[in-house]
Image (tube, helix red, strand yellow):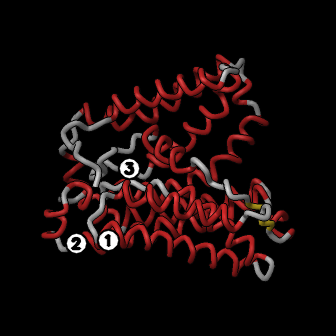
Amino acid sequence: MNNKSLKAKQGPGDWFTELIPLLGFVCIVVVFSILTGGKIIRFRSLNLMLSQVYVLMITSMGVFMIMTVGGLDFSQGSILGLSSIIFCVVSEHSIILAILAAVAAGALMGAFNGFFYVKFKIASFIVTICTMYLFRGLCKYITTNGPIPATVDVMDLNHTWFKVVVTAVVMLIGFLVFRFTRVGYDLKAIGAGETAARFSGCRPDLKKFLVYVASGAITGFASFINVIKVGAITGTAGRQLETQILIALVLGGMPISGGAKARFSNIIIGSFAYCVLEKSLPMVFPISATQQLVKGIIFLIVVALTIDHKALKVIK
């Protein structure tokens, strides 16, 4: 069944459900603009939010593909940290070579996840929780003697326009591949049902393995943007990124079980919504515990409104 057939079967309720994430994002911006007295939409605040969104949006694209096939990945923060360390070390020789090394390292770590997930049929969240600790341990071991600095030339690239262009190009490539090639169709088919996907000519195990490789490579590239921002890497680099990604994607309307209802817009809307919340909540609620409480309530509301009970199943 092609995309046109799927759209033809959608009723008013389906269209409204798809609009909920965008409406929710607009509501978040309006409400917190009022509560902060307009501070959140000032240029300085917008610039700070943008500085947080680049890495989150790029890494979310990789996890988006994993969630589309019905999986999860809790190791992205650790992959980002270890890839950033590799980038810093190699950057002393060449920035281009450092980018390639970080991408290769990310792909290798993604392949490690994908191998155990596909070969041994271990649930994705169990595999990636284990590798999260493994890769994080390596990060802390390597940085025992202190932060790992990158070449000073990297800081010359720390311009908003440069990071916007790089992020936009990466997202555009991802969108074109997901929307206009067989890749997007196969990933959605696997998420909807592996048996049917297999009969359609797709090879689910191979595609799931490659999805983890691609996701790791994307995060490896994101480490380049991460290092541009901070200049040096410690053992805590990328900590809690996996949680931020999952919350951002769900805020963007990403179905927990993946499948045909995954939309590339989930990445963009969710990333901006998360960054707005992260910047706005401290302005409105100075107490950290209250911030967490409000964030949890918003997260639960979004999940309750966007969850597809008909397609709900155990995460693979």
Q: Are marks 3 and 1 in contact (CB under 8 Å)?
A: no
Q: Given contact means CB atoms under 8 Å apart, are the residues at marks 2 and 1 in contact?
A: yes
The residue labelled by disc 3 is 263
**Residue 202 shows which numbered tag?**
2
Q: Is residue 12 left or right of residue 30?
A: left
Which numbered disc flags the more N-terminal residue, 2 or 1? 2
Residue 100's quadrant in the figure?
Answer: bottom right
Residue 196: which numbered mark, if any? none
User: Helix, strand, or loop for circle 2?
Assistant: loop
The x, y position of residue 87, in whole percent, is: 69, 72
Q: How much space separates mark 2 and mark 1, taking CA atoms?
A: 8 Å
Between disc 2 and disc 3, whose residue precedes? Answer: 2
Residue 84, horizontal then vertical, whole percent: 67, 65
Give residue 229's position: percent from left, percent from top: 76, 56
In the picture, the disc for residue 207 is 1
Compare residues 43 and 57 and report the one nearer the observer.
57
